[in-house]
Amino acid sequence: MTQPTNGAASRAALAIAVMAAGVLTVCAAYAAGRAGVAGPAAHAAYWIGEAAIFAPPAMLALARKAPGDGVAAGLAVALATATYLVNYAYSPAFFTFPDALQHWRTLTNVLATHHVFHVNYLLPISSGYPGLEIDASALAQVTSISTFAAGLIVAGLAHLVFTAAIYALLRLVSGSPRIALGAVTVYATNPHYQVFDTIFGYQTLALAFFGLALVFARLATRHAATRRELVRYWLLAAASAAATIVTHHVTSFMLITSLALVAAVSAAFRQRPAALATSVFAAGCTAIFAIWAWRVAPTTISYLSPAASQLGNGIGSLVDGHPATSAGSTAVGAPLPFRIASYAVTLLIMAVIPVGWRQVWRTKRDDPWALALAAGSAIYYGCAILPLLAPNGSELAGRLFTFVYIPVGYTLATAFTARPPALRRQAAAAGATAVLLAGGLATGWPPWWEQLPGRYVVDGFESGITPQGIAAATWAGQQLNPGQRIAADYTNNVLLGSYGNLSPVNGVAELFCGPAWTATDAVIARQQDINYLVIDQRTASHVPETGSYFQGSAKSCPTPIPAADLAKFATTRGFDRIYDNGDIIVYRLTEAAYAP
Amino acid sequence: MRPDQGPGGGTGNTSAGRTAAGGAPGTRPGTRRHRHGEPLPWIIRAVFAAGIFLAVTALIGLLLNLTTGLTTTGWLIAAGLLGAAAALRLSTRHARRAAEGHADRREDDAGGTGAGHAGRRPSVLAAQPGEGWDGSGLGHALVRARVSRSSLRTTGFALLAAALAGGAVGLTAASAGWQRTPGFAQLWLVPAAGGATLGVRSDYPGTQTFHLELRRGNGTTQKWTLSLASGQSWQRAVAVANGTRLAARLAAPDRILTVEATS
């Protein structure tokens, strides 16, 4: 057995120091953005900082002397910590990511009522999966810290747990700290790892439980497990799976799918005990998830079915020779380098996966988990063509990458380390890692136009949140009855649904466009039972980077919206102008507004 | 065999090594140590403990929701029960280990296999730092750091990392308020039974003076001069007959705000 060496510890500590310097550099870039001096130097600092965060784990994974278990695990956790700090640094004062605001509303409801399952008008499905809010409310109540701090802590812990779970799972499967660290590094370059899967959102926490469930299932299906270990690991796996199911729908589905894949591969390779155990576990998870979705969160099917039907329609269109045009990618309309990076990363992964398959088949063909991971990486090819299958295919692919990058990371890391490290191979693997990182950042979150905070972008995501919007929504929460239906542009709908506890109505852009309030508008307003309309005057002077001011509308307004269109409500019968802060105006609709 | 691959795995592992995922380096297949497998590093187990805690908390929260509700008292009672259960579990485990240790010593005295120390380690997750895993780990080194040039360098780098991370957090906290937004005011007039609520809030920096004017449907006008600090609000209930038209106008430092409603 290798004796402990302080040299390895020194290298690890130096690597972590370099990663910390990377975090500081990114934070400096963010600070420059907030100070209004986000020039080329700040953007360069952002990229340099990100490179400094990812370079140490990649270099140690590719080094001639392989990292030990402790160093590799420590760097995996350090990578999670560094990326979490970067995410925190983007919005250090309050939640600005729309999904985080949605869950913050559910958390506020739990703290106000001391019970879960209360309606959240902004994201109704979230109240049916309250694991995140339970944990955050427990922390907030027991420690008396703010809901923002509690949310940050729970999300941060979840991010660490998920990353550690990926490391442990791939370490157990591969038997190699080098491959596990390389796989985690590759995984961390996935477009959603640094932000979307790190925010205060139910998927962030569910991923942690998902990872734990897989690790414990893997430990329980080892040949060498004793009876006591079997009981312990299956209990822990069951608890983790149950926690996944009460926390997030899609993650629960992916857990069941992953277990089913392992069971199928185990059965195919005649590993009957593992196949039986994993099948029973997957069946149990399926039963609990079905009961939960049926009895507790009955809106699950209706919430997820639009994406499924879009995908089905897209496949039908592709078969007919009319592929859909995806508009969801954050790289759409991006500068040329961003687009090149997004294509390069796709091509690179597709090219290297078969190399990993060959290596896995050569060395791990009697391990169903390794084979299942290799098989799972094939889904990446499906993700690559998703933008051609559905109008929001890019977004769907991005969401799937959260899960698909686990087998992709394992397969790529296996390929990169297939042969003994030589300078040429190290350089090639380092270049590939750089492409993965650049592609992940280019197609991930935040989008290129708000990569640094501080710039106002009308109806952007984080960059659309301003004190004026928060003030209007906070006022609405204090002065208007909860659950009143309100129509506004994208950002104000998110704020009014979260801070305001109102029920936002999407898909009614036509009410805001046009020089006059028409009979059709009145019918739509009545059908949608709209109580209030909110005008953001900035939509008359700013162009949205996303291409639209409104969500879910078939009709798009001109950009910018003509000021006369927004002014029509002041002279239309039936509208009470009840709030004004200079940028945002709230109108109350009376009976007359509905008159055709 | 490559240096990163113990007999339990790796891309070039042997069929004997594959019989147990991650078998401990240097152990023969079939020994008790091999059967228990290679433990995960302490840092992973520490993070896993936090994850299990979060999972259990989420499940307990569902139980509390059915009973006392998610109150501070409910959580404290649950924490107390869990703490007691954990203490009981630890004490029984301690007793069992003591009994196993006694049996192992007797086995060793009788010329056993010498695997008794590994046999006391109950599981992959429960292994102690420094046992069974490649000792080049950071955690192990931190646990067993000796005063040497190398460990001083490690400590120095660790302190540097902590300082840089602390600087990043400090810079973030300091810059949170750097984003410049123009000051603004809020004016509202919310109809209610028998009148309306008229209000003003200042979100300008410092104290500002505002001129507010309220016009009723009958032509009467009411005026106020308000001096409001940043974040300060002013609100009045306006009593009028139902159906009366009300209009208010606020002269803020850099703009005019207006509201209008029928009570």
Image (cartoon, coloured by chain):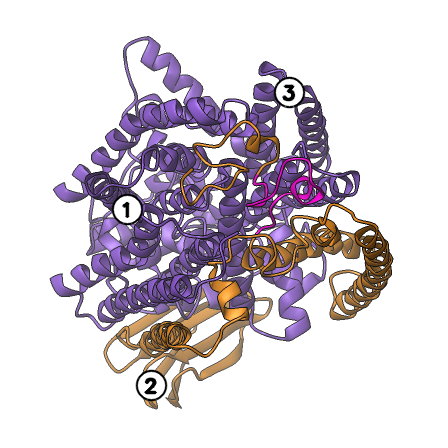
Chain colours: A purple, B orange
Residue A391 x %, y %: 34, 28
- The front one of A387 and B172 is B172
Determine which of the numbered discs, if any, sits on residue A545 in the image: none
- Residue at 45% in and 70% down: B189
Q: Amino acid at mark 1?
A: Leu
What subunit carries mark 3? A
Q: In this rendering, does residue A590 appear at all?
A: no
What subunit carries mark 1? A
Q: To which residue does mark 1 refer?
A: A437
Q: Are marks 2 and 1 on the same chain?
A: no
- The front one of B18 and A281 is B18
* Crowdedness near tag 2: few (<14), some (14–19) or many (≥20) residues, C-alpha within 10 Å: some
Q: Earlier in the sequence, mark 3 or mark 1?
A: 3
Q: To which residue does mark 3 refer?
A: A271
- Residue at 54% in and 34% down: A303
Q: To which residue does mark 2 refer?
A: B210
